[in-house]
Image (cartoon, coloured by chain):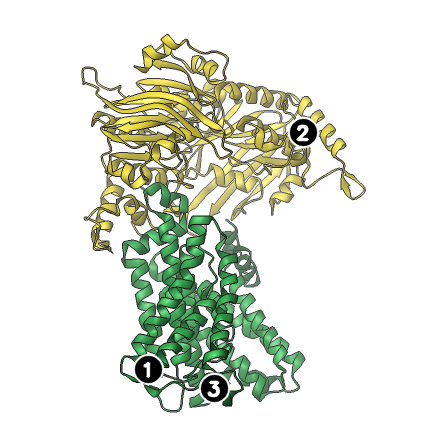
Chain colours: A yellow, B green
Amino acid sequence: MTPFLQAIGIDKTYPGGVHANQGIDLSVARSTVHAVVGENGAGKSTLMKILFGVEQPNAGEIRLEGNPIVLPSPRAAIAAGIGMVFQHFSLVPSFTVAENVVLGGEPRAGLKLDRKKASDTVRELAERFRLPVDVDVPVEQLPVGQQQRVEILKALYRDARLLILDEPTAVLAPQEVVELFAAVRSLTSQGRTILFIAHKLPEVLEISDTISVMRGGKMVGTVAAKDATEKSLARMMVGRDVALKINRAAPGIPHTHLCRISDLTVKNDHGLNAVSDVNLILRTGEIVGIAGVEGNGQSELFDAIGGLRPIASGSVELGKTDITHISVLERRAAGMANIPEDRIATGSAGGATVAENIVATELTDTRFVRHGLLDLKSIRAHAVKLIEKFSVRVQGPESAIGTLSGGNMQKVVVARELSSEPSLLLVSHPTRGVDLGATEFIWQNIAKARDAGAAVLLTSADLSEILALADRMIVLYRGRIVAAFVNSEEVTPEVLGSYMLGFAEQSAEERNAALA
Amino acid sequence: MTQGRLILSETGRIVMAAIFALAVTLVIIFFASKTPWATFETFVTSPLSSKRTIGIWIDDSVKLALAGLAFSLVFQARQFALGVQGQVYIGGLFATLVAFSPLGTTWIALPAGILAAMIGGAVIGFIPGYAKSKLGANEIVSSLMLNYIAYDVCNYVLRVYLASLESGLTTSASFPPQSIYPAFIPRTRVDFGIVVALATTLVVWFLLYRTAWGLKLRLTGHNARFAAYSGIRSSFIMVSAMTAAGAIGGLLGAVFVQGTAYGKLSIGFEAGMAFEGILITIVARNRPLAIPFVALGYGYLRQGAALMNYRADVPAEVIGIVQGIVILLVASSFTVPGKAMLARLMGNRTAASRATS
């Protein structure tokens, strides 16, 4: 049987000289879920962009149902029946679900949008493919998992027969992943084909029929999911065995109270309570993980402690210093460091050089600035040292940080924050969109900071990350702590998940036992 | 990309844009002129035709460069304060007041006038910055409104207190000679303004790339959220950048009135030149060291167009169109679709895909 989609000998060299795809062959069977896995920079995204018409290959051919096609633009890809859901959604927040879905292909009543028809069509589509969503609600009021459904509906509304999903689970809670997978199965059973980009291997194994592995711009191999294991895939991806295992804090080290968060309440951008009455003590040499579905107050909590958002009431003490209302600069001087959730929006200045990004938090340090003048030599030397220590792949400290791959950019951010040897380290989603090799490295360095005596507050959308790193865990639901655990074998993603979705709440005694 | 290759590719882009501008100009001249080739020749060569026209070209470039430098500071901090025009008028007024004060006939006349102008400009620059940081006022609106206020304050003081009767109330009396720049080449406009522009270029470069303040300013411009996260007081940076840019705008005012071209205060002396600084700094990508070169190049085209008006059969309106197209072409070649378009016209597909990636 002819494969639904075939890519033959796809080759792509970017003008900068990066050979992102080298003679890639890919063959996707109809009505299957085909996963493409690989580290960051392996060339997955480039290949997908070529299949969706965003990028043009230098050589090679794409065949759809056996017929060669040319995809000069996403519009052509959509016309050919290919849809793509990117990691970053492109939705109009103030428009309703139905309006977003039909945007660009609206049913009309005269010159006006036929709202009723739009709603009905979208509702019908959602039911047919098991993507339940309220079609008349503005998109901005929906959680991320449902926004993703809207993106999928957008592609289906344009009659996509092949749907490319770019790391769709990166932003979802475990239960939402289950729902997404149910929808994916219903799509394939109705004849649609799914191309699934991912690097969380357990999920890939669960949902896919076929798995293709890419490394360094080449296709390493394609295997049937039933024949693959997590370990075999990881070895194919990285080219060596990967140990994603972090030692817990050694027992017997005295953990002294370092940071006391008392009755903390923080407002969100709309003036509503995003974090309510949170009490938490962070101890030296210990990692506390915060689990929660995105949008349950984690961002606001971290921003408030980091000094990027005012604290409405309550207090935060770091050592003997009350840091509740002091500036970011003073907090950093008191020993705080912050690995932010978004390395591009918050953690770096894309147009500035790597060296400038590294020194940005140290501009009061006389090593780098004297009498208001920059010591370019020592700034450069400091950057070179960190680049080497963290094996950042970059041409040199003068390269703009925006040109680095996600993993390398994150390494720069982590290197900068850890270089100040913080006593309190805030860490949000440290390995989001980061490849396995870099993840291993970043985890080890966070553990190193912990062993050096730092109190670490960690949050991640990836529960396995929290379970791997944290000594204690709390669950935030609607801005409140609903559960707290000491990390142990009994705490599983499913246990955390039921608290994260608000199905269960611990009693105050249970909570306090783990919070003390 | 290395610094050297970056400079090369940027220079190449500017040259390409200039060539396109010339080509489009040629087409328009063909429609508007009876002797198109002669007219085009006038456009291209006339700025070099005499010592006097060269002097005007250089003098214009000095002023364009200073305006560009003022804008580059605020644009690097990504503040769209457009108040250079107002700063020029207030700076010009303050320099004039010094020139007609007892100081105006002493050796200190020039430095004192420049200092007064810079302080005046700095105040005009500071106001929108302060209003933005304390009141959340949009700096585009407030700086543009301040331009009107400054312009009319300058005119008011000129008409009521300074105007000389012979001039029909449009200019002041001439400054005392101690308050006018020495001309480096007699009977041309090439004067001390060149030194001011070059020194300012170096100072702005030094501030931006060698001081902690400049690094903070650039980081704030690249990503204000990152700056806040790093512990940079971005509102201070914002206000101080606008104030410093205001001082340069004021300095430009002094260069106008103290220069040999004027040597007095007159109504509307700035003639819209301040805003052309926006074009200069956009083309120079806000890089202070590139600004003098861009100012010279643009100043040349501008001068050629103006002379075409006097010396050929092309009416002034056509000149305006040509200038507009030149600006549009040069500026649009720096946008992403512009780059792609340029690359496609060149038949260079790889560059096109780079521009869209």
Q: Percent from the top left, x then y, of residue A117?
A: 76, 32
SS category of the residue bearing label 2: loop
The mark that comes first in sequence, 1 or 3, is: 1
- Work out which quarter of the rendered image holds the C terminus of chain A and state it: top left
Q: Which residue is mark 2?
A: A136
- The lab-note entry on whether marks 1 and 2 share a chain reads no
- The lab-note entry on whether marks 1 and 3 share a chain reads yes
* The quadrant where residue B48 appears: bottom left
For the residue pair B52 and A183, the one nearer the viewer reads as B52
Question: Does the CB distance between marks 3 and 2 fall below 8 Å?
Answer: no
The answer to whether A425 is drawn above or below residue A20 in the figure is: above
Residue type beneath disc 2: Asp
Residue type beneath disc 1: Gly
Q: Chain of mark 1?
A: B
SS category of the residue bearing label 3: loop
- Give the spatial CA distance, label 1 vs label 3: 17 Å
Numbered badge on residue B164:
3
- Give the spatial CA distance, label 3 vs label 2: 71 Å
- Work out which quarter of the rendered image holds the N terminus of chain A and state it: top right
